[in-house]
Amino acid sequence: MPLHQQTADLYDPDRLYAVARLYYEEEHSQSEIAADLKVSRPTISRMLAHARETGMVQIRVIHPHSGGGEKLREQVRTRLGLSAVYLAEGLQHSPMGRGMQLAVRRAILDMELHKGDGLVISSGKAMWDISHMDLPDLRDVALAPGVGGVAEPEPWHQTNEIVRTIALKTGATYTPIFAGAIPSPLMFQALQEDSAFQEVRRVWATAKGALVGVGSPTTGRTSIASAIPKDSLRDSAGDICLHFFDQDGKDLIFPGSDRTVRIPRELLSAIPHVTAVALGQEKVGSILISSRAGMFTRLVTDEATARQILEAAD
């Protein structure tokens, strides 16, 4: 039957369904449908977009290796000796977007954080991306940065802002660190007496959970906290919370490391649910080394990185 009708009726559900069926199922071109409706091709494009937005048209992109996620997850968990692994489908990209959101949310929910519990959050692009996701309710959970980051030029190293953004979204409380990653000796000494920093240290010592990024080898990185002496860390295989480690997972000493503002490694290791969030081939070696060193207990990544981890671990 002809599809001629007034433009005002174009968004009628029956009309949208007919247009969507012609385009997606019968493979008519938008120009052909537009000619039949006596409207412009951009109008048909808008109708098809409306059909998708309202759920009338649902398009699924299926990864060729989908369906094996549970097995892959268990293989990575066992190989790395972790308590849990959360996988996003297929190959995700940085910056992390909605494709990683479900895995991140699940990992946070599994921490079972309640009023008064502490959550430590590191710096880095992964944490910056997470701060822009739709996150679960964390009402009255106490957030604290895992490292200093005042006056950093790049937003993903500004830990106070990352933590503040997450707190505002989730209903959590937060305490900032009023210091850079490596303050002057005088500033570092004064920081120890600061009441806000004492509260941060309390959260560090009692936290139930932590969200941390995994930094890739220093020599290949395009972004690092401005105070970090990158040239002195050529042997770094990666870092977590500014704890730079070598190929054996041992802490590296560098100029200013004695006054680097970061959660002590022994306190980080004592947190029950330390969840690392990292993806990409450049992170695989760093993930393997830091997991073997016991720097985290849970991992959020994508299926592509998970397969690369298993290949590298063989």
Image (tube, helix red, strand yellow):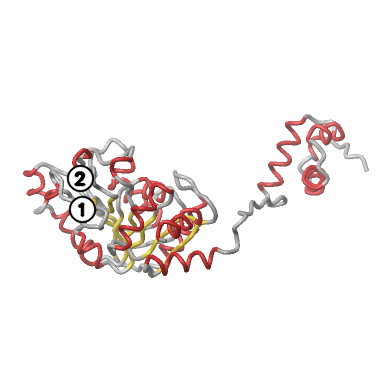
In the rendered view, would you say 98 is above or below 46?
below
Image coordinates for residue 164, horizontal then vertical, percent = 32, 49
Image coordinates for residue 258, horizontal then vertical, percent = 11, 50
* Furthest residue in direction top, as rendered: 40
- Name the element at disc 2: loop
- Name the element at disc 1: loop
Residue 151 relative to residue 90: left or right: left
Which residue is identified by label 2? 181
Image coordinates for residue 52, horizontal then vertical, percent = 68, 47
In the rendered view, would you say 233 is above or below 243?
above
Which residue is identified by label 1? 262
Q: Amino acid at mark 1?
A: Arg
Front residue of this view, candidates 147 and 255 = 255
Q: Amino acid at mark 2?
A: Ala
Asked whether the residues under the numbered discs 2 and 1 touch, taking CB atoms below 8 Å apart as contact, a structural biologist would say yes
Label 2 and label 1: CA atoms lie apart by 8 Å
Name which residue lies at 29% across and 40% down. Answer: 219
Q: Earlier in the sequence, mark 2 or mark 1?
A: 2
Crowdedness near tag 1: few (<14), some (14–19) or many (≥20) residues, C-alpha within 10 Å = many
